[in-house]
Image (tube, rainbow, N blue to C red):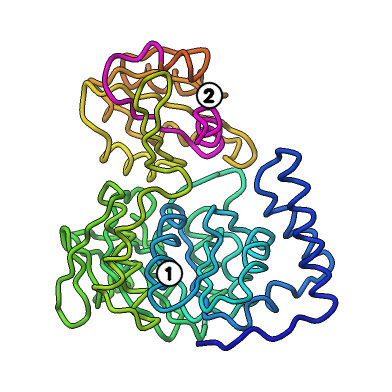
């Protein structure tokens, strides 16, 4: 383990105290958890605070376009088998939020930290992680995030020569390219449902060939590495060929993929796959995702989908027709204000479902659904959408801030 926490300097103590006070004021004012503003205040007083707070921790960083909050939670649950964990479990994944999370971890042994893709290399320099889990890269928030190939290149450059063990999804060519500059990589065959951002070779720009589950570039020879861990149906295959059953309360293939990566990450810290996967079963929901709530006398399952890859995975796990579906899309700063990604989502997969549409950008979504040839109803708000939905459990799918709006409305 990294060791016991050393006493903080007076400046660092002041920064932590001021950050916690700012967070408390934010919570009292009803403006959220306060983790971001608290971290900003703390870092303003001590710009090196994040590095100081991590010195005693064995840290694993988790980054991806989709699945990082869930995977962070699964890894944290697995590592608790060996000791106390501090984690930014609610998803505040930029340096300020991470700093706030670590400020409460003086007694922890492990730090399990979700990191926004844009900040990964910088956070890795600060906290000197023992391991970094890289899951996937796909188009997301086009008005603030770099194009996926550019982001993979930034990761490749920023992580080059890292001392960390990189746990990387071998089935995503962009992840493979980013990780292949690192000396120690554990390759996991975790799957890749969404492939539309990975048809060109990140090494030379040539067209990737994709026979079955394999992929390679016929021009430069860049290819899928041989994995040592693999997701196989409902099992994780470890490097010794042993198959360990995945029994999750979280739904869908994507969460089995997250569990496979999490098991490989936990193994890097000495946690047996059997123990790790058994502990993951405890996770029923992640920051409200997958929760089934009661609202207006109806069962409503809350699902988050922020980008085309995420919507594709979500469509695969909802109950079939005629299950009613509510779709909600916003375009606030935390979502990205560019909604052109709606046209990349295959909404025809919702054929046969009674659909209700709400959210700030419900008319944008309505146009997309009309072009897809679907029957839907635009509603004034979530209350009307629930009230007009046919009988049965409702699947409510929303992007980031729309999801938070739904959670507040149902009291989740």
Range of residues picked out in magenta? 387-412
Name the spot of residue 247 as percent of width and height, x first: 22, 58
Considering depth in this image, is 346 or 116 the residue closer to the camera? 116
Distance between mark 1 and mark 2 Cα atoms: 33 Å
Name the spot of residue 125 as percent of width and height, x first: 62, 77
Residue found 46% across the figure and 23% down from its top: 365
How many numbered circles are shown?
2
Name the spot of residue 133 as percent of width and height, x first: 43, 69
**Mark 2 residue crowding within 10 angstroms, few (<14) / some (14–19) / many (20+):** many
Q: Tell me, yes or no, if residue 212 can be seen here.
A: no
Label 1, secondary structure: give it: strand
Disc number for residue 133 = 1
Q: Tell me, yes or no, if residue 159 can be seen here.
A: yes
**Mark 1 residue crowding within 10 angstroms, few (<14) / some (14–19) / many (20+):** many
Considering depth in this image, is 367 or 135 the residue closer to the camera? 135
Q: Is residue 78 magenta?
A: no
Could you tell whether 236 is left or right of 74 in the image?
left
Q: Is residue 46 above or below residue 354?
A: below
Could you tell whether 145 is left or right of 214 in the image?
right
Disc number for residue 359 = 2
Label 2, secondary structure: give it: loop
Q: Quadrant of residue 405?
A: top right
Considering depth in this image, is 136 or 201 the residue closer to the camera? 136
Label 1 with label 2: CB-CB less than 8 Å: no
Residue found 55% across the figure and 32% down from its top: 408
Disc number for residue 228 = none
Considering depth in this image, is 291 or 68 the residue closer to the camera? 291
Residue found 31% across the figure and 74% down from its top: 187
Q: Is residue 395 magenta?
A: yes
Q: Which comes before the other along the chain, label 1 or label 2? A: 1
Q: Is residue 236 above or below residue 239?
A: above
Name the spot of residue 98 as percent of width and height, x first: 63, 63
């Amino acid at each position: 383990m990294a060791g016991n926490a050393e006493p903080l300097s007076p400046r660092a103590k002041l920064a932590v105290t001021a950050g916690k006070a700012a967070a408390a004021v934010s919570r009292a004012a009803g403006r959220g958890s306060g983790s971001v503003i608290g971290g900003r205040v703390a870092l303003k007083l001590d710009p090196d605070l994040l590095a100081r707070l991590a010195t005693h921790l064995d840290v694993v960083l988790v980054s991806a376009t989709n699945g990082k909050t869930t995977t962070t939670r699964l890894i944290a649950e697995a590592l608790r088998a060996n000791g106390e964990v501090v984690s930014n479990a609610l998803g505040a994944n930029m340096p300020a939020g991470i700093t706030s999370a670590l400020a409460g971890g003086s007694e922890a042994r492990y730090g399990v930290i979700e990191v926004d893709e844009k900040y990964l290399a910088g956070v890795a320099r600060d906290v000197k992680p023992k391991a970094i889990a890289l899951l996937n890269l796909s188009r997301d928030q086009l008005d603030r995030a770099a194009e996926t190939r550019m982001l993979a290149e930034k990761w490749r450059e920023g992580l080059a020569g890292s001392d960390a063990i990189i746990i990387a999804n071998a089935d995503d060519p962009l992840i493979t390219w980013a990780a292949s500059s690192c000396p120690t990589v554990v390759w996991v065959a975790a799957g890749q449902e969404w492939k539309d951002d990975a048809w060109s070779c990140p090494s030379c720009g040539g067209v990737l060939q994709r026979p079955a589950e394999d992929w390679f570039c016929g021009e430069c020879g860049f290819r899928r590495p041989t994995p040592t861990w693999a997701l196989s149906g409902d099992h994780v295959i470890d490097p010794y060929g042993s198959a360990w059953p995945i029994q999750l309360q979280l739904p869908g293939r994507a969460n089995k993929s997250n569990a496979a990566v999490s098991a490989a990450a936990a193994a890097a810290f000495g946690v047996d796959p059997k123990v790790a996967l058994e502990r993951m079963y405890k996770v029923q929901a992640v920051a409200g995702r997958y929760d089934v709530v009661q609202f207006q006398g109806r069962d409503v399952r809350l699902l988050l989908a922020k980008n085309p890859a995420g919507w594709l995975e979500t469509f695969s796990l909802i109950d079939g027709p005629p299950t009613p579906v509510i779709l909600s899309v916003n375009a606030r700063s935390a979502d990205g204000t560019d909604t052109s990604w709606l046209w990349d989502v295959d909404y025809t997969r919702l054929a046969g479902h009674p659909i209700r549409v709400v959210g700030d950008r419900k008319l944008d979504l309505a146009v997309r659904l009309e072009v897809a040839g679907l029957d839907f109803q635009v509603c004034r708000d979530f209350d009307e959408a629930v009230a007009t939905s046919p009988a049965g459990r409702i699947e409510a799918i929303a992007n980031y801030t729309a999801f938070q709006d739904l959670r507040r409305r149902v009291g989740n």
